[in-house]
Image (tube, helix red, strand yellow):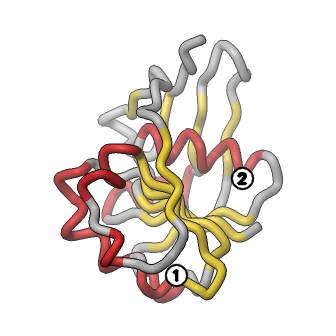
Amino acid sequence: MKIAILGSGAVGGYYGARLARAGEDVTFIARGAHLAAIREHGLEIRSAALGDFVARARAEEDTSRVGHVDLVLFAVKTYDNATVLPLLKPMLGPSTVESRARSAARRTSRRHSKRPVSSSRPVRTGASCSAKRLAICRASPRV
């Protein structure tokens, strides 16, 4: 499955890293220093439940370079929706599914896309990202 992670912070980075580790074709969408750090170091996950690991996957800033994907995991803070929603279009194919956090799905009109939308409950990962190495997500999923 070809998956794009739009919002590669603590939540998107954590789930994208897990999907990449499981063998899925994952592309992280990021910018600036975060993009450079993902490309150079990968995403390091530290988890008491899953163990520590580094996931290496493709990372892009320009969504038109990603192509059509099967799934877009939309893990962006709500206040960034207006800026980020136009970035979806180049990745959406005829069978692409978007998965958004519940708050984003509630605040985003279905008029933006005619694609199936999956809305999930708010996620508690206990994840945080290091300020020194922006792409390093240390995640400890809460049980």
Rate crowding at label 2 as few (under 14), some (14 to 19) or many (20 or more) other CA atoms within 10 Å: some
Q: Earlier in the sequence, mark 2 or mark 1?
A: 2
Q: Quadrant of residue 56?
A: bottom right
Quarter of the N terminus within the rendering: bottom right
From the viewer's perspective, is residue 3 above or below residue 93? above
Which x, y percent locates residue 100?
Answer: 44, 54
Pick the residue in front: 45 or 83: 83
Pick the residue in front: 116 or 17: 116
For the point 42% across and 84% down, the residue is: 89
Left or right of 83? Residue 90 is right
| Three-letter amino acid code at the position of disc 1 | Met
| Three-letter amino acid code at the position of disc 2 | Ala
Disc on res. 91: 1
Q: Quadrant of residue 34?
A: bottom left
Secondary structure of the residue carrying tag 2 is helix
Pick the residue in front: 54 or 97: 97
Quarter of the C terminus within the rendering: top right
The residue tagged 2 is 20
Q: Residue furthest right?
A: 23
Which x, y percent locates residue 3?
Answer: 64, 65
Which x, y percent locates residue 13?
Answer: 51, 46
Left or right of 96? Residue 114 is left
Q: Which label sits in the foreground, 2 or 1?
A: 1
Question: How far apart are the two marked residues, 2 and 1, measured between alpha carbons?
Answer: 18 Å
